[in-house]
Image (tube, grey):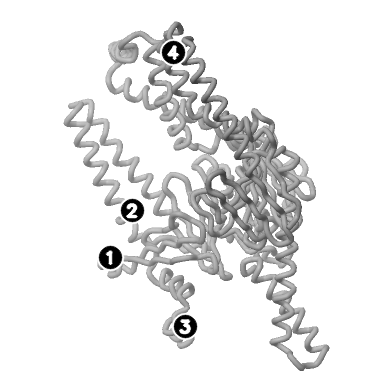
Amino acid sequence: MNERRSLHPLYIAYGFLSVIKGLLPLIIIMLLRGVNWDKVLQWYWIAGAAGLFALMLVLSYLQWKRFGFWLENDRIVIRSGLLFREEKTIYYSRIHSVNVEQPLIQRLLRTAQLKIETPGGGQKSDGILHVLSVAEANRIKEQLRAHAEGTAATTATAAAAARRELAHPNGDAAETREEALLLDDALLSDEAGEKTSATTSSEGQVRQLQTPAGSNGTLRQAEDSVRLDTGQLFKAAATSLNFGLAIAFIGGLYSFADDFLELLLPDGFFEHLIEDTQSLMSSVLFIVGIAVFVILFAWVLSIGLFILKFSGFTMGRAGQQVSISYGLLEKKSYVFDPKNVQAVIINESILRQWIGFAEVRLQIVSSDKQEQLMLHPFVAFRDIDSLLARFVPGMRVFDPRELSAAPAKALLYYLRVPYIIAVMISAACIGFFGVAGIWSVFLFPLVYAWRKSCHRAAGGLLKEGQLTLRHRLLHRTTYLVRRPRIVALKAKSTAAQRRKGLSSVAVHALGSGTAFGVTCLDRNQVEEVWQWYSRHPAAKKEKRNS
Protein backbone atom coordinates (compact mmCIF):
# COMPACT_ATOMS: atom_id res chain seq x y z
CA MET A 1 0.00 0.00 0.00
CA ASN A 2 1.32 3.49 -0.88
CA GLU A 3 1.90 6.25 1.61
CA ARG A 4 -1.06 7.41 3.66
CA ARG A 5 -2.32 10.89 2.87
CA SER A 6 -4.40 13.23 5.03
CA LEU A 7 -6.75 16.12 4.46
CA HIS A 8 -5.60 19.69 4.93
CA PRO A 9 -5.42 20.71 8.63
CA LEU A 10 -8.02 23.38 7.91
CA TYR A 11 -10.53 20.51 7.93
CA ILE A 12 -10.74 21.22 11.67
CA ALA A 13 -12.10 24.70 10.93
CA TYR A 14 -14.28 23.30 8.12
CA GLY A 15 -16.37 21.24 10.52
CA PHE A 16 -16.90 24.21 12.83
CA LEU A 17 -17.78 26.60 9.97
CA SER A 18 -20.23 24.05 8.51
CA VAL A 19 -22.18 24.06 11.77
CA ILE A 20 -22.10 27.87 11.94
CA LYS A 21 -23.32 28.07 8.32
CA GLY A 22 -26.32 25.87 9.15
CA LEU A 23 -27.18 28.00 12.19
CA LEU A 24 -26.51 31.36 10.49
CA PRO A 25 -30.14 32.18 9.53
CA LEU A 26 -31.29 31.44 13.08
CA ILE A 27 -28.49 33.57 14.54
CA ILE A 28 -29.28 36.54 12.26
CA ILE A 29 -33.01 36.37 13.02
CA MET A 30 -32.32 36.27 16.76
CA LEU A 31 -30.01 39.28 16.50
CA LEU A 32 -32.57 41.29 14.51
CA ARG A 33 -35.40 40.41 16.88
CA GLY A 34 -33.29 41.69 19.73
CA VAL A 35 -31.20 39.90 22.30
CA ASN A 36 -31.18 40.55 25.99
CA TRP A 37 -27.41 40.84 26.34
CA ASP A 38 -27.62 41.06 30.13
CA LYS A 39 -28.90 37.48 30.20
CA VAL A 40 -26.72 36.22 27.35
CA LEU A 41 -23.53 37.49 28.97
CA GLN A 42 -24.12 35.49 32.13
CA TRP A 43 -21.20 33.25 32.98
CA TYR A 44 -23.10 29.99 32.42
CA TRP A 45 -24.06 30.99 28.85
CA ILE A 46 -20.47 31.94 28.12
CA ALA A 47 -19.18 28.71 29.66
CA GLY A 48 -21.70 26.65 27.70
CA ALA A 49 -20.78 28.33 24.40
CA ALA A 50 -17.07 27.90 25.11
CA GLY A 51 -17.60 24.23 26.01
CA LEU A 52 -19.61 23.61 22.83
CA PHE A 53 -16.94 25.36 20.76
CA ALA A 54 -14.19 23.26 22.36
CA LEU A 55 -16.17 20.04 21.83
CA MET A 56 -16.69 20.85 18.14
CA LEU A 57 -12.98 21.54 17.69
CA VAL A 58 -12.01 18.29 19.44
CA LEU A 59 -14.43 16.24 17.30
CA SER A 60 -13.23 17.93 14.12
CA TYR A 61 -9.60 17.26 15.11
CA LEU A 62 -10.32 13.57 15.78
CA GLN A 63 -12.16 13.23 12.48
CA TRP A 64 -9.21 14.82 10.69
CA LYS A 65 -6.72 12.49 12.40
CA ARG A 66 -8.80 9.40 11.59
CA PHE A 67 -9.35 10.34 7.94
CA GLY A 68 -6.81 8.95 5.50
CA PHE A 69 -6.60 7.92 1.86
CA TRP A 70 -4.14 5.97 -0.28
CA LEU A 71 -3.52 6.08 -4.03
CA GLU A 72 -2.55 2.57 -5.09
CA ASN A 73 -1.73 1.14 -8.50
CA ASP A 74 -5.31 0.28 -9.42
CA ARG A 75 -7.51 1.90 -6.77
CA ILE A 76 -7.98 4.67 -4.24
CA VAL A 77 -8.77 3.68 -0.65
CA ILE A 78 -10.52 6.09 1.74
CA ARG A 79 -10.81 5.42 5.48
CA SER A 80 -12.77 7.55 7.94
CA GLY A 81 -14.93 7.43 11.07
CA LEU A 82 -14.63 7.79 14.83
CA LEU A 83 -16.88 5.25 16.54
CA PHE A 84 -17.57 3.31 13.36
CA ARG A 85 -14.77 2.87 10.86
CA GLU A 86 -15.65 3.13 7.19
CA GLU A 87 -13.44 2.11 4.29
CA LYS A 88 -14.17 2.75 0.62
CA THR A 89 -12.26 1.20 -2.25
CA ILE A 90 -12.77 2.76 -5.67
CA TYR A 91 -11.05 1.16 -8.67
CA TYR A 92 -9.75 3.58 -11.26
CA SER A 93 -11.50 1.69 -14.04
CA ARG A 94 -14.86 2.46 -12.36
CA ILE A 95 -14.34 6.21 -12.08
CA HIS A 96 -16.60 8.16 -14.43
CA SER A 97 -15.62 11.68 -13.42
CA VAL A 98 -13.47 13.57 -10.93
CA ASN A 99 -14.75 16.98 -9.80
CA VAL A 100 -12.88 19.71 -7.93
CA GLU A 101 -15.24 22.23 -6.31
CA GLN A 102 -14.88 25.30 -4.11
CA PRO A 103 -18.13 26.02 -2.26
CA LEU A 104 -18.37 29.12 -0.10
CA ILE A 105 -16.63 27.65 2.95
CA GLN A 106 -13.77 26.26 0.85
CA ARG A 107 -13.37 29.63 -0.86
CA LEU A 108 -13.11 31.31 2.56
CA LEU A 109 -10.52 28.75 3.65
CA ARG A 110 -8.75 28.91 0.25
CA THR A 111 -9.10 25.15 -0.10
CA ALA A 112 -11.06 22.82 -2.38
CA GLN A 113 -12.98 19.56 -2.20
CA LEU A 114 -12.59 16.64 -4.57
CA LYS A 115 -15.50 14.38 -5.57
CA ILE A 116 -15.18 10.99 -7.27
CA GLU A 117 -18.18 9.69 -9.23
CA THR A 118 -18.77 6.06 -10.27
CA PRO A 119 -21.75 4.29 -11.91
CA GLY A 120 -22.91 2.86 -8.59
CA GLY A 121 -23.12 6.21 -6.82
CA GLY A 122 -25.90 6.91 -4.34
CA GLN A 123 -27.29 10.25 -3.21
CA LYS A 124 -23.75 11.44 -2.48
CA SER A 125 -20.54 11.06 -4.42
CA ASP A 126 -18.74 7.75 -3.90
CA GLY A 127 -15.59 9.41 -2.63
CA ILE A 128 -15.31 12.92 -1.16
CA LEU A 129 -12.12 14.55 0.06
CA HIS A 130 -13.66 17.59 1.74
CA VAL A 131 -10.69 19.85 2.43
CA LEU A 132 -7.50 19.84 0.33
CA SER A 133 -5.25 22.61 -0.80
CA VAL A 134 -6.16 23.73 -4.31
CA ALA A 135 -2.81 22.53 -5.64
CA GLU A 136 -3.19 19.14 -3.92
CA ALA A 137 -6.75 18.69 -5.21
CA ASN A 138 -5.65 19.40 -8.77
CA ARG A 139 -2.63 17.12 -8.38
CA ILE A 140 -4.79 14.22 -7.15
CA LYS A 141 -7.26 14.88 -9.96
CA GLU A 142 -4.47 14.58 -12.51
CA GLN A 143 -3.14 11.42 -10.82
CA LEU A 144 -6.58 9.79 -10.92
CA ARG A 145 -6.98 10.81 -14.55
CA ALA A 146 -3.58 9.36 -15.45
CA HIS A 147 -4.30 6.14 -13.54
CA ALA A 148 -7.70 5.82 -15.22
CA GLU A 149 -6.18 6.31 -18.68
CA GLY A 150 -3.47 3.76 -17.93
CA THR A 151 -6.00 1.22 -16.72
CA ALA A 152 -8.19 1.80 -19.77
CA ALA A 153 -5.21 1.39 -22.12
CA THR A 154 -4.15 -1.85 -20.42
CA THR A 155 -7.69 -3.21 -20.60
CA ALA A 156 -8.00 -2.26 -24.25
CA THR A 157 -4.69 -3.91 -25.15
CA ALA A 158 -5.62 -7.11 -23.32
CA ALA A 159 -9.05 -7.21 -24.92
CA ALA A 160 -7.56 -6.65 -28.38
CA ALA A 161 -5.02 -9.43 -27.83
CA ALA A 162 -7.76 -11.79 -26.69
CA ARG A 163 -9.84 -11.00 -29.74
CA ARG A 164 -6.89 -11.56 -32.06
CA GLU A 165 -6.14 -14.90 -30.42
CA LEU A 166 -9.75 -16.00 -30.74
CA ALA A 167 -9.90 -14.84 -34.33
CA HIS A 168 -6.67 -16.57 -35.48
CA PRO A 169 -5.24 -19.02 -32.97
CA ASN A 170 -3.04 -20.72 -35.58
CA GLY A 171 -3.50 -18.58 -38.65
CA ASP A 172 -1.08 -16.90 -41.00
CA ALA A 173 0.98 -14.13 -39.40
CA ALA A 174 0.25 -11.56 -42.08
CA GLU A 175 -3.44 -12.35 -41.98
CA THR A 176 -3.35 -12.14 -38.21
CA ARG A 177 -1.72 -8.71 -38.30
CA GLU A 178 -4.31 -7.47 -40.75
CA GLU A 179 -7.12 -8.85 -38.60
CA ALA A 180 -5.51 -7.32 -35.52
CA LEU A 181 -5.73 -3.86 -37.04
CA LEU A 182 -9.40 -4.38 -37.77
CA LEU A 183 -10.02 -5.64 -34.26
CA ASP A 184 -8.17 -2.70 -32.74
CA ASP A 185 -10.30 -0.32 -34.81
CA ALA A 186 -13.45 -2.11 -33.69
CA LEU A 187 -12.33 -2.00 -30.06
CA LEU A 188 -11.66 1.72 -30.20
CA SER A 189 -15.03 2.20 -31.85
CA ASP A 190 -16.77 0.29 -29.06
CA GLU A 191 -14.98 2.25 -26.35
CA ALA A 192 -15.98 5.54 -27.96
CA GLY A 193 -19.61 4.54 -27.67
CA GLU A 194 -20.04 2.82 -31.02
CA LYS A 195 -18.31 5.69 -32.74
CA THR A 196 -19.79 6.48 -36.16
CA SER A 197 -18.95 9.10 -38.72
CA ALA A 198 -19.70 11.77 -36.13
CA THR A 199 -16.12 12.99 -36.49
CA THR A 200 -16.45 13.54 -40.23
CA SER A 201 -18.50 15.86 -42.39
CA SER A 202 -20.66 14.81 -45.33
CA GLU A 203 -17.56 14.98 -47.51
CA GLY A 204 -15.67 12.74 -45.11
CA GLN A 205 -13.41 15.46 -43.69
CA VAL A 206 -13.00 16.12 -39.97
CA ARG A 207 -14.74 19.30 -38.94
CA GLN A 208 -12.68 21.69 -36.83
CA LEU A 209 -14.03 24.44 -34.59
CA GLN A 210 -12.86 27.59 -36.31
CA THR A 211 -13.78 31.25 -35.95
CA PRO A 212 -12.87 33.15 -39.12
CA ALA A 213 -11.48 36.63 -38.74
CA GLY A 214 -14.24 39.19 -38.58
CA SER A 215 -17.00 36.63 -38.03
CA ASN A 216 -19.51 36.57 -35.19
CA GLY A 217 -18.63 33.08 -34.03
CA THR A 218 -18.94 32.19 -30.37
CA LEU A 219 -15.86 30.08 -29.82
CA ARG A 220 -12.62 31.65 -28.68
CA GLN A 221 -10.12 28.84 -28.48
CA ALA A 222 -6.51 27.93 -28.37
CA GLU A 223 -5.41 24.67 -29.91
CA ASP A 224 -6.66 22.52 -27.03
CA SER A 225 -9.16 24.71 -25.16
CA VAL A 226 -12.37 26.67 -25.54
CA ARG A 227 -13.12 29.77 -23.49
CA LEU A 228 -16.07 32.12 -23.11
CA ASP A 229 -15.12 35.79 -23.09
CA THR A 230 -17.01 38.51 -21.21
CA GLY A 231 -19.17 39.56 -24.16
CA GLN A 232 -20.21 36.00 -24.95
CA LEU A 233 -20.93 35.34 -21.28
CA PHE A 234 -23.29 38.33 -21.11
CA LYS A 235 -25.04 37.31 -24.35
CA ALA A 236 -25.47 33.80 -22.99
CA ALA A 237 -26.89 35.16 -19.73
CA ALA A 238 -29.28 37.57 -21.48
CA THR A 239 -30.69 34.84 -23.74
CA SER A 240 -30.82 31.95 -21.26
CA LEU A 241 -34.30 32.92 -19.95
CA ASN A 242 -33.76 30.68 -16.95
CA PHE A 243 -36.78 32.00 -15.06
CA GLY A 244 -37.07 28.79 -13.07
CA LEU A 245 -33.71 29.40 -11.39
CA ALA A 246 -34.63 33.03 -10.70
CA ILE A 247 -38.05 32.15 -9.25
CA ALA A 248 -36.50 29.47 -7.02
CA PHE A 249 -33.91 32.00 -5.83
CA ILE A 250 -36.60 34.61 -5.14
CA GLY A 251 -38.66 32.06 -3.22
CA GLY A 252 -35.72 31.00 -1.10
CA LEU A 253 -34.69 34.62 -0.52
CA TYR A 254 -38.23 35.61 0.49
CA SER A 255 -38.60 32.70 2.91
CA PHE A 256 -35.23 33.63 4.42
CA ALA A 257 -35.89 37.40 4.52
CA ASP A 258 -39.56 37.29 5.53
CA ASP A 259 -38.79 37.78 9.20
CA PHE A 260 -36.28 40.53 8.39
CA LEU A 261 -38.84 42.47 6.33
CA GLU A 262 -41.33 42.35 9.18
CA LEU A 263 -38.72 43.96 11.42
CA LEU A 264 -37.41 46.54 8.96
CA LEU A 265 -40.68 47.67 7.33
CA PRO A 266 -43.79 49.17 8.96
CA ASP A 267 -46.77 46.95 9.69
CA GLY A 268 -49.01 46.45 6.65
CA PHE A 269 -46.43 48.04 4.31
CA PHE A 270 -47.16 45.77 1.32
CA GLU A 271 -50.94 45.94 1.84
CA HIS A 272 -50.87 49.77 1.82
CA LEU A 273 -48.55 49.77 -1.21
CA ILE A 274 -50.94 47.56 -3.20
CA GLU A 275 -53.99 49.65 -2.20
CA ASP A 276 -52.29 52.93 -3.18
CA THR A 277 -51.14 51.49 -6.51
CA GLN A 278 -54.62 50.17 -7.35
CA SER A 279 -56.14 53.58 -6.62
CA LEU A 280 -53.90 55.14 -9.28
CA MET A 281 -54.64 52.67 -12.07
CA SER A 282 -57.30 50.22 -13.21
CA SER A 283 -57.30 46.60 -12.11
CA VAL A 284 -56.28 45.44 -15.59
CA LEU A 285 -53.32 47.82 -15.81
CA PHE A 286 -52.33 46.87 -12.29
CA ILE A 287 -52.28 43.16 -13.14
CA VAL A 288 -50.38 43.78 -16.39
CA GLY A 289 -47.91 46.05 -14.60
CA ILE A 290 -47.26 43.47 -11.90
CA ALA A 291 -46.75 40.76 -14.52
CA VAL A 292 -44.30 42.90 -16.53
CA PHE A 293 -42.38 43.87 -13.39
CA VAL A 294 -42.07 40.24 -12.24
CA ILE A 295 -40.89 39.11 -15.69
CA LEU A 296 -38.31 41.89 -15.98
CA PHE A 297 -37.06 41.35 -12.44
CA ALA A 298 -36.78 37.59 -12.99
CA TRP A 299 -34.95 38.20 -16.29
CA VAL A 300 -32.41 40.58 -14.73
CA LEU A 301 -31.93 38.22 -11.78
CA SER A 302 -31.43 35.25 -14.10
CA ILE A 303 -28.71 37.21 -15.92
CA GLY A 304 -26.88 37.84 -12.67
CA LEU A 305 -27.17 34.25 -11.47
CA PHE A 306 -26.00 32.91 -14.84
CA ILE A 307 -22.91 35.15 -14.82
CA LEU A 308 -22.06 34.11 -11.26
CA LYS A 309 -22.41 30.44 -12.16
CA PHE A 310 -20.56 30.30 -15.50
CA SER A 311 -18.02 33.10 -15.18
CA GLY A 312 -14.55 31.95 -16.28
CA PHE A 313 -15.89 29.03 -18.32
CA THR A 314 -13.02 26.99 -19.78
CA MET A 315 -13.09 23.63 -21.55
CA GLY A 316 -10.20 21.60 -22.92
CA ARG A 317 -8.66 18.21 -23.44
CA ALA A 318 -6.74 16.59 -20.60
CA GLY A 319 -5.07 13.64 -22.31
CA GLN A 320 -7.87 11.29 -23.32
CA GLN A 321 -10.28 13.10 -21.02
CA VAL A 322 -12.15 16.39 -21.05
CA SER A 323 -11.80 19.05 -18.36
CA ILE A 324 -14.39 21.76 -17.70
CA SER A 325 -14.21 24.54 -15.10
CA TYR A 326 -16.39 27.56 -14.30
CA GLY A 327 -17.81 29.61 -11.44
CA LEU A 328 -17.18 32.94 -9.72
CA LEU A 329 -18.34 32.51 -6.12
CA GLU A 330 -18.42 28.72 -6.25
CA LYS A 331 -15.64 27.34 -8.43
CA LYS A 332 -16.23 23.95 -10.05
CA SER A 333 -13.89 21.80 -12.10
CA TYR A 334 -14.82 18.50 -13.79
CA VAL A 335 -12.72 15.86 -15.51
CA PHE A 336 -14.52 13.03 -17.32
CA ASP A 337 -13.93 10.46 -20.02
CA PRO A 338 -16.02 11.05 -23.18
CA LYS A 339 -16.75 7.31 -23.27
CA ASN A 340 -18.80 7.78 -20.09
CA VAL A 341 -21.19 10.29 -21.65
CA GLN A 342 -24.64 8.73 -21.68
CA ALA A 343 -26.55 11.34 -23.68
CA VAL A 344 -26.23 14.84 -25.12
CA ILE A 345 -28.92 17.47 -24.44
CA ILE A 346 -29.15 20.59 -26.62
CA ASN A 347 -31.34 23.38 -25.20
CA GLU A 348 -32.49 26.36 -27.26
CA SER A 349 -34.43 29.12 -25.53
CA ILE A 350 -36.78 31.17 -27.72
CA LEU A 351 -34.28 34.02 -28.01
CA ARG A 352 -31.37 31.69 -28.72
CA GLN A 353 -33.36 29.79 -31.32
CA TRP A 354 -34.06 33.04 -33.18
CA ILE A 355 -30.37 33.96 -33.31
CA GLY A 356 -29.18 30.39 -33.97
CA PHE A 357 -27.50 29.60 -30.63
CA ALA A 358 -27.90 26.89 -28.00
CA GLU A 359 -26.36 25.37 -24.89
CA VAL A 360 -25.03 21.82 -24.84
CA ARG A 361 -25.27 19.65 -21.72
CA LEU A 362 -24.08 16.10 -21.08
CA GLN A 363 -25.80 13.34 -19.16
CA ILE A 364 -23.15 11.50 -17.17
CA VAL A 365 -23.38 9.00 -14.34
CA SER A 366 -23.20 10.85 -11.02
CA SER A 367 -24.67 10.84 -7.53
CA ASP A 368 -27.17 13.51 -8.61
CA LYS A 369 -29.49 11.82 -11.10
CA GLN A 370 -30.83 15.20 -12.26
CA GLU A 371 -27.41 16.69 -12.88
CA GLN A 372 -26.49 17.60 -16.43
CA LEU A 373 -22.91 18.70 -16.97
CA MET A 374 -22.58 21.87 -19.05
CA LEU A 375 -20.37 21.19 -22.08
CA HIS A 376 -20.85 24.68 -23.54
CA PRO A 377 -23.31 27.38 -22.37
CA PHE A 378 -23.45 29.41 -25.62
CA VAL A 379 -22.51 27.99 -28.99
CA ALA A 380 -23.81 28.50 -32.52
CA PHE A 381 -26.05 25.61 -33.50
CA ARG A 382 -24.09 25.08 -36.70
CA ASP A 383 -20.92 24.51 -34.63
CA ILE A 384 -22.35 21.89 -32.26
CA ASP A 385 -21.52 18.94 -34.52
CA SER A 386 -17.89 20.07 -34.67
CA LEU A 387 -17.87 20.63 -30.91
CA LEU A 388 -19.09 17.07 -30.29
CA ALA A 389 -16.68 15.64 -32.85
CA ARG A 390 -13.82 17.16 -30.89
CA PHE A 391 -14.90 16.55 -27.29
CA VAL A 392 -17.58 13.82 -27.39
CA PRO A 393 -16.78 11.60 -30.40
CA GLY A 394 -19.53 9.15 -31.19
CA MET A 395 -22.35 11.71 -30.99
CA ARG A 396 -23.63 13.54 -34.04
CA VAL A 397 -25.94 16.47 -34.70
CA PHE A 398 -27.75 15.84 -37.97
CA ASP A 399 -29.48 18.44 -40.09
CA PRO A 400 -32.75 19.33 -38.27
CA ARG A 401 -34.57 19.01 -41.58
CA GLU A 402 -33.85 15.26 -41.49
CA LEU A 403 -35.99 14.77 -38.38
CA SER A 404 -39.41 13.24 -39.00
CA ALA A 405 -41.88 15.76 -37.58
CA ALA A 406 -45.07 14.93 -35.73
CA PRO A 407 -47.99 14.44 -38.17
CA ALA A 408 -50.53 17.25 -38.58
CA LYS A 409 -53.26 15.03 -37.08
CA ALA A 410 -51.31 14.95 -33.81
CA LEU A 411 -51.97 18.66 -33.18
CA LEU A 412 -55.28 17.85 -31.45
CA TYR A 413 -53.46 15.88 -28.75
CA TYR A 414 -51.14 18.83 -28.11
CA LEU A 415 -54.06 21.25 -27.74
CA ARG A 416 -56.84 19.51 -25.86
CA VAL A 417 -55.55 19.36 -22.26
CA PRO A 418 -54.02 22.91 -22.26
CA TYR A 419 -57.23 24.27 -23.76
CA ILE A 420 -59.32 22.62 -21.06
CA ILE A 421 -57.09 24.23 -18.43
CA ALA A 422 -57.31 27.61 -20.22
CA VAL A 423 -61.14 27.40 -20.24
CA MET A 424 -61.16 26.68 -16.51
CA ILE A 425 -58.81 29.59 -15.78
CA SER A 426 -60.82 31.97 -17.98
CA ALA A 427 -64.11 30.95 -16.34
CA ALA A 428 -62.58 31.47 -12.89
CA CYS A 429 -61.25 34.94 -13.85
CA ILE A 430 -64.61 36.05 -15.26
CA GLY A 431 -66.43 34.72 -12.22
CA PHE A 432 -64.04 36.41 -9.79
CA PHE A 433 -63.24 39.73 -11.56
CA GLY A 434 -66.45 40.16 -13.55
CA VAL A 435 -66.16 42.19 -16.76
CA ALA A 436 -62.44 42.77 -16.17
CA GLY A 437 -61.91 39.01 -16.31
CA ILE A 438 -62.92 38.92 -19.99
CA TRP A 439 -59.30 39.78 -20.75
CA SER A 440 -58.49 36.19 -19.83
CA VAL A 441 -59.88 35.00 -23.19
CA PHE A 442 -56.55 36.13 -24.64
CA LEU A 443 -55.23 32.93 -23.09
CA PHE A 444 -56.72 30.95 -25.97
CA PRO A 445 -54.57 32.37 -28.82
CA LEU A 446 -51.54 32.29 -26.53
CA VAL A 447 -52.13 28.64 -25.66
CA TYR A 448 -52.70 27.81 -29.33
CA ALA A 449 -49.46 29.52 -30.39
CA TRP A 450 -47.54 27.77 -27.61
CA ARG A 451 -48.87 24.30 -28.28
CA LYS A 452 -48.57 24.77 -32.03
CA SER A 453 -44.86 25.53 -31.53
CA CYS A 454 -44.58 22.40 -29.35
CA HIS A 455 -46.17 20.36 -32.13
CA ARG A 456 -43.86 21.83 -34.77
CA ALA A 457 -40.78 21.15 -32.63
CA ALA A 458 -41.62 17.47 -32.00
CA GLY A 459 -39.65 15.03 -34.09
CA GLY A 460 -37.32 12.06 -34.17
CA LEU A 461 -34.57 10.48 -36.24
CA LEU A 462 -32.86 7.09 -36.15
CA LYS A 463 -29.62 7.24 -38.12
CA GLU A 464 -26.14 5.72 -37.88
CA GLY A 465 -26.92 3.91 -34.65
CA GLN A 466 -28.01 7.08 -32.85
CA LEU A 467 -31.50 8.09 -31.75
CA THR A 468 -32.32 11.80 -31.94
CA LEU A 469 -35.48 13.08 -30.25
CA ARG A 470 -36.72 16.65 -30.04
CA HIS A 471 -39.53 18.33 -28.15
CA ARG A 472 -40.49 21.68 -26.65
CA LEU A 473 -42.00 22.74 -23.37
CA LEU A 474 -40.75 26.33 -23.24
CA HIS A 475 -37.27 25.72 -24.60
CA ARG A 476 -36.68 23.47 -27.59
CA THR A 477 -34.66 20.45 -26.47
CA THR A 478 -32.85 17.94 -28.66
CA TYR A 479 -31.77 14.65 -27.10
CA LEU A 480 -28.99 12.48 -28.58
CA VAL A 481 -28.41 8.94 -27.31
CA ARG A 482 -26.88 5.72 -28.63
CA ARG A 483 -28.36 2.31 -28.06
CA PRO A 484 -25.82 0.95 -25.48
CA ARG A 485 -26.65 3.90 -23.20
CA ILE A 486 -30.41 3.30 -23.15
CA VAL A 487 -31.66 1.55 -20.03
CA ALA A 488 -35.31 1.42 -21.09
CA LEU A 489 -37.38 2.45 -24.08
CA LYS A 490 -41.14 2.93 -23.80
CA ALA A 491 -43.64 3.22 -26.65
CA LYS A 492 -47.29 3.89 -25.81
CA SER A 493 -50.52 4.94 -27.50
CA THR A 494 -54.23 4.98 -26.78
CA ALA A 495 -56.77 3.15 -28.91
CA ALA A 496 -57.73 6.41 -30.63
CA GLN A 497 -54.09 7.22 -31.33
CA ARG A 498 -53.50 3.77 -32.79
CA ARG A 499 -56.43 4.25 -35.18
CA LYS A 500 -54.82 7.49 -36.33
CA GLY A 501 -51.39 5.91 -36.64
CA LEU A 502 -49.83 7.84 -33.75
CA SER A 503 -47.61 6.73 -30.91
CA SER A 504 -45.42 8.32 -28.21
CA VAL A 505 -41.88 7.27 -27.35
CA ALA A 506 -39.68 7.82 -24.29
CA VAL A 507 -36.10 6.74 -23.57
CA HIS A 508 -34.34 6.42 -20.23
CA ALA A 509 -30.56 6.68 -20.42
CA LEU A 510 -28.11 5.24 -17.90
CA GLY A 511 -27.58 7.55 -14.93
CA SER A 512 -30.63 9.71 -15.62
CA GLY A 513 -33.42 10.17 -13.09
CA THR A 514 -36.09 10.86 -15.71
CA ALA A 515 -36.97 9.73 -19.22
CA PHE A 516 -37.00 11.92 -22.32
CA GLY A 517 -40.10 11.54 -24.45
CA VAL A 518 -41.86 12.91 -27.52
CA THR A 519 -45.64 12.85 -27.86
CA CYS A 520 -47.59 11.57 -30.86
CA LEU A 521 -45.09 10.76 -33.58
CA ASP A 522 -45.85 8.62 -36.60
CA ARG A 523 -46.51 5.06 -35.40
CA ASN A 524 -44.34 3.48 -38.11
CA GLN A 525 -41.38 5.59 -37.02
CA VAL A 526 -41.86 4.58 -33.38
CA GLU A 527 -42.11 0.91 -34.42
CA GLU A 528 -38.80 1.24 -36.25
CA VAL A 529 -37.17 2.66 -33.12
CA TRP A 530 -38.70 -0.11 -31.02
CA GLN A 531 -37.36 -2.84 -33.31
CA TRP A 532 -33.93 -1.19 -33.39
CA TYR A 533 -33.76 -1.15 -29.60
CA SER A 534 -35.43 -4.45 -28.67
CA ARG A 535 -33.66 -6.63 -31.27
CA HIS A 536 -36.40 -9.18 -30.70
CA PRO A 537 -35.94 -12.28 -32.92
CA ALA A 538 -39.40 -11.84 -34.41
CA ALA A 539 -38.69 -8.18 -35.08
CA LYS A 540 -35.38 -8.99 -36.79
CA LYS A 541 -37.01 -11.72 -38.87
CA GLU A 542 -39.78 -9.36 -39.94
CA LYS A 543 -37.21 -6.74 -40.87
CA ARG A 544 -35.19 -9.23 -42.95
CA ASN A 545 -38.34 -10.38 -44.79
CA SER A 546 -39.25 -6.83 -45.59
Say what amino acid the circle numbered 2 marks.
Answer: Tyr
Q: Mark 1 and mark 3 in contact? Answer it, CB < 8 Å.
A: no
For marks 4 and 2 on the same chain, the one whose residue lies earlier in the sequence: 4
**Quick check: 266 above or below 182?**
above
For marks 2 and 1 on the same chain, the one whose residue lies earlier in the sequence: 2
Q: Which residue is mark 1?
A: 494
Say what amino acid the circle numbered 1 marks.
Answer: Thr
Q: Residues within 10 Å of mark 2 (few under 14, many from 20)?
A: some
Closer to viewer: mark 2 or mark 3 = 3
In this view of the protein, which residue sits in the foreground, 190 or 442?
190
In this rendering, position of residue 537 left or right of residue 189: left
Closer to viewer: mark 2 or mark 1 = 1
In this view of the protein, which residue sits in the foreground, 366 or 497?
366
Q: Is residue 332 visible?
A: no
Tell me where residue 313 appears, x and y as whole percent. Answer: 67, 40
Q: Mark 2 and mark 3 in contact? Answer it, CB < 8 Å.
A: no
Q: Which residue is mark 2?
A: 414
Say what amino acid the circle numbered 3 marks.
Answer: Lys
| Residue drawn at point x = 61 percent, y = 60 percent | 340
Q: Residues within 10 Å of mark 1 (few under 14, many from 20)?
A: few
| Residue drawn at point x = 67 percent, y = 65 percent | 202
Q: Mark 3 and mark 4 in contact? Answer it, CB < 8 Å.
A: no
| Mark 2 to mark 3 CA distance (whole Å) | 33 Å
Q: Quadrant of the C terminus?
A: bottom left
Q: Which mark is residue 32?
A: 4
**Quick check: 173 above or below 16?**
below
Q: Which residue is mark 3?
A: 540
